[in-house]
Amino acid sequence: MEATNNKNTATLLHLSALSQYLFPFGNFIFPILIWSATKEKSEYLDEQGKQVINFQLSLFVYSLILALIAIPILLITVLRNFSIKDFSNHNEFPFKNINIEDLNGMAVFGILAVIVFFALKVLEFFLIILASVKASNGMGYNYPITIPFLK
């Protein structure tokens, strides 16, 4: 059974990943700071810290891959409907040239990548809450879809 102090620290470790909504890269900075300060105190804290950091790094890699798929596809799909003359008209952006019927399979693939990205962010939020609850009860939690960068 883990000491109450270790349970509270592990809970804070997991919840610190939510700091990404307040600070850029807070989901990396705060867990790393807390983990590095407490990893020698307990094997439980060391393991939970590695879990949080591995999960956040994994989500970053997945998000980067989805962005590398979605952004070029969507830009090419939208920009191929415009000419240089359309951009030189400073009065208004030519939205009339965007036609939903012209969407091809690649654009649908790009849109699907965006949808998967947002689903991943929602899943991340709920998994962090679940891990925090488990940590507050002294139970270890292994995040799914995690690449073990730190072992």
Image (cartoon, rainbow, N blue to C red):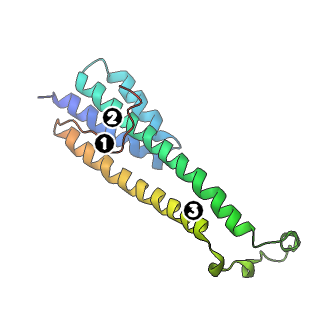
Corner quadrant of residue 137 = top left
Q: Is residue 41 above or below residue 61?
A: above
Marker disc for residue 51: 2
Residue tagged 3: 110
Quarter the N terminus occupies: top left
| Residue in view at x 24 percent, y 35 percent | 8
| 10 Å crowding of disc 3: few (<14), some (14-19), many (20+) | many
The image quarter containing residue 59 is top left
Q: For the residues carrying marks 2 and 3, which lies nearer the camera in this image?
A: 3
Residue 31, position in %: x, y?
A: 40, 34
Q: Quick one: which residue is furthest to the top in this view?
A: 40
Image location (x, y in percent) of residue 24: 53, 43
Residue type for callout 1: Tyr
Q: What residue is at 22 percent from the left and 28 percent from the top?
A: 6
Residue at figure coordinates x 28%, y 28% from the top left: 47
The correct choice, above or below, for 55 with respect to 120 in the image is above
Q: Cα distance, mark 2 to mark 3?
A: 30 Å
> Which comes sooner in the sequence, label 2 or label 3?
2
Foreground residue among 111 and 86: 111
Image: 101 above or below 53: below
Q: Are marks 1 and 2 in contact (CB under 8 Å)?
A: yes
Q: Secondary structure at mark 1?
A: loop
Q: Earlier in the sequence, mark 3 or mark 1?
A: 3
Mark 3 residue type: Gly
Kindly identify which numbered label has been placed on residue 143.
1
> In the displayed structure, would residue 70 be above or below residue 36?
below
- Whole-angstrom CA distance, mark 1 to mark 2, is 7 Å
Q: Which mark is residue 16?
A: none
Q: Amino acid at mark 2?
A: Gln
Q: Residue furthest front?
A: 105
Location of the C terminus by quadrant is: top left
Q: Earlier in the sequence, mark 1 or mark 2?
A: 2
